[in-house]
Image (cartoon, helix red, strand yellow):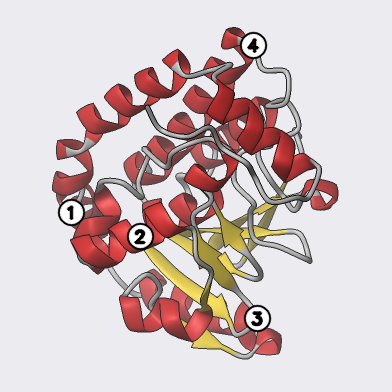
Amino acid sequence: MGHVHVEQRGDATWITLDAPERRNAFDPEMSAAAVEALEGSTGSRAVVITGAPGAFCAGGALDMLGTPSLAEMRGLYRGSLHLFDAVRQHPRPVIAAVNGPAAGGGNELVIACDLAIAAESATFGQTGPRVGSSPVTGATNVLGLQIGEKRAKEMAMLCRRYSAEQALDLGLVNRVVPDSELVAAVDALVDELAALSPRYLEITKISSNVWWNAARDSFSTGLGMLVQAVGSDDMIEGATSFLEKRRPQFPKPE
């Protein structure tokens, strides 16, 4: 189903992003499939999002960015925001089981999830200004509430990579475990949630969306600006250099 694998594991629905050839980066089809899987999992006690072996999620698929069209980019941007909103509006706790690199929109997917457990090998970080984009659906707004404004700007603007232990220190994840123990740690967390009232967990979760909801206009405005920048010199150079695996040479500011 659109590079998404769905499995019922005890009290949880596990949603695996399954496109290892592109490090589980999502295109509009994958985003739509993940949203469909989320919408079909309300009967579970919890939902777990993870990636096929090799990565958690590399964010939006960049293969179309070298020769972008407005329609394609709108679809990519809107699809990612639809996915993040589906995570936030889901009535059950959504857990990120971060089994590898979470980059760009993959890092924003971690931001959107309610809880996150990371394997020791996982890494985190944004890519926007390095690849001709900007992380406007979580990292430029909600992330500041999670880890503090200065740290969030460092992550969003400098495009550094952070280890799982650094992510734990920042407050981006709840726990770090050895890679071989990730599934067991997530299962234990699901068991803990399953002992609680789903009715009042839902109330608690939806009430906690106050800051996400307050930032929602920022998401829409940011995506509008990204659409207007489609085809710009900076966007083309960022995407092309990424695909060619070289250092970008962005135009000088005016």
* 124 on left or right of 194: right
Rendered image: mark on residue 114: 2
* 145 on left or right of 12: left
Mark with earlier residue (2, 3):
2
Rendered image: mark on residue 208: 1
Tag 2 near tag 1, CB within 8 Å? yes
Secondary structure found at label 2: loop
Locate residue 238: give its quadrant: top right
Mark with earlier residue (2, 4):
4
Residue found at x 46% / y 17%: 227
Secondary structure found at label 3: loop
Q: Nearer the viewer, mark 4 or mark 1?
A: 4
Secondary structure found at label 1: loop
Residue 27 at x, y = what percent?
Answer: 67, 32
Picture layout, residue 41 above or below residue 2: below
Mark with earlier residue (4, 1):
4
Foreground of the two, 31 or 22: 22
Q: Distance of mark 2 from mark 3, alpha carbons? A: 21 Å
Amino acid type indicated by mark 2: Asp
Q: Distance of mark 2 from mark 1, alpha carbons? A: 9 Å
Rendered image: mark on residue 69: 4
Residue found at x 39% / y 24%: 223
Q: Distance of mark 4 from mark 3, alpha carbons? A: 36 Å
- Which residue matches tag 3? 121
Q: Nearer the viewer, mark 4 or mark 3?
A: 4
Q: Distance of mark 2 from mark 4, alpha carbons? A: 34 Å
